[in-house]
Amino acid sequence: MQGQLSIINDDMEISGGGMPSIENLRTSSDQHEEAMDQRNNNQQAFLAEHEEIQSYCDSDNSEHDKSGKRTQESKEKPKTWLIWKNTLCLSIAYFLLFGAYMGLQILQSSINCVAGLGFVSLVVVYACMLFSGLFSPPLVIGWLGVKRTIVLSMIPYIVFTAANFKPQWYTMIPASAIVGLAAPIIWTAQGIYVATAGRKLSAVTGKPSDLLIRRKMTVFFGIAFLSSPVFLLVPSFIYSSDSPKNETGPSLNHSFESQATCGASDCQEMQGNKTTFCDPPDKNLTNILLGFYLSMGFAAVATVVFLVDQMAENGMAKQVTLKKL
């Protein structure tokens, strides 16, 4: 019987059957703990790597945001510069054009004094200006746009200057008429352009548009009307070389009585019964002055064409219609 049990035990040991031993349990428990420790270590390493990647991404996003802000600021600066460039170039163009025109306008009663041609031409200018200002600016600007209107409205001033090379009734009166028709249009277009530039600058900088429009208008008119004293020095310089005339012109040695009648009566005692005295300056000197004024007109047109950008009016010019008036 005992021999049989021993044989059975030997068979069980050979076949690997039966209950596991305590040493085997301890070994498997140690292996499980080592696996768990390895797993925890792997998890901690993964979390540390994830935090490092997240911090890198956050820093990269912050740098991207900063670079985006710098890019936006760098884009805003050129826009601001371009808007101011357009305003300044437009101011210079008006400085050239109206400096020449106003200088020539003041001299009309002197260089075109025969039969009062210069005086009548100025009357025609302002009469046509009154008529044109009632309806033409909104129609022309809404049809052509602001920049094209400014360019085309400058041409009559050049024509008026050119007409003074041959001052006759058939040249001066038509030229004066088209100047009068163009004057309200060119000044209305200027106002729309500068106001639109102020609004665009407000959209870029965030400053109030009313403040920027007033500032731009101040800069524009400050530059444009600086032309009056500057361009009046030009005829003074040119005509200074014209010597006084003693044969056909008035004498420098006027008596006190004759000087008392000068002014509105134009020294009438020197021309008998005539109530006006016409002594235009030397024609060659006048042509030199007209050539200078004409070149200023062409320079004004070129300034607007090549240096002033076509600005989208955002419907502003189209809103200026006859019904709105």
Image: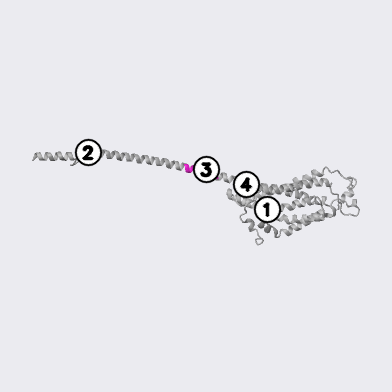
Q: In the rendered structure, does residue 142 fall within the stretch colored magenta?
A: no
Decide which of 142, 91 is in the foreground and name it: 142
Q: What residue does disc 1 label?
A: 148
Q: Which of marks 4 and 1 is in front?
A: 1
**Marks 3 and 1 close (CB-CB < 8 Å):** no
In the image, what residue occupies the spot 27% across and 38% down?
31
Rendered residue at 74%/52% (across/down): 157
Span shown in magenta? 60-71
Q: Which of marks 3 and 1 is in front?
A: 1
- For residue 95, the mark is none
For numbered disc 4, what is the local secondary structure? helix
**Which quadrant, please, contains the C terminus?**
bottom right
Residue type for callout 1:
Arg
Question: Mark 2 highlights which residue?
Answer: 24
Q: Distance between the residues labelled 2 and 4?
A: 86 Å
* View extreme (right): residue: 272
Residue where numbered disc 4 is placed: 82
| Amino acid found under the numbered disc labelled 2 | Asn
Callout 4 amino acid? Leu
SS at circle 2: helix
Percent x, y for residue 39?
32, 40
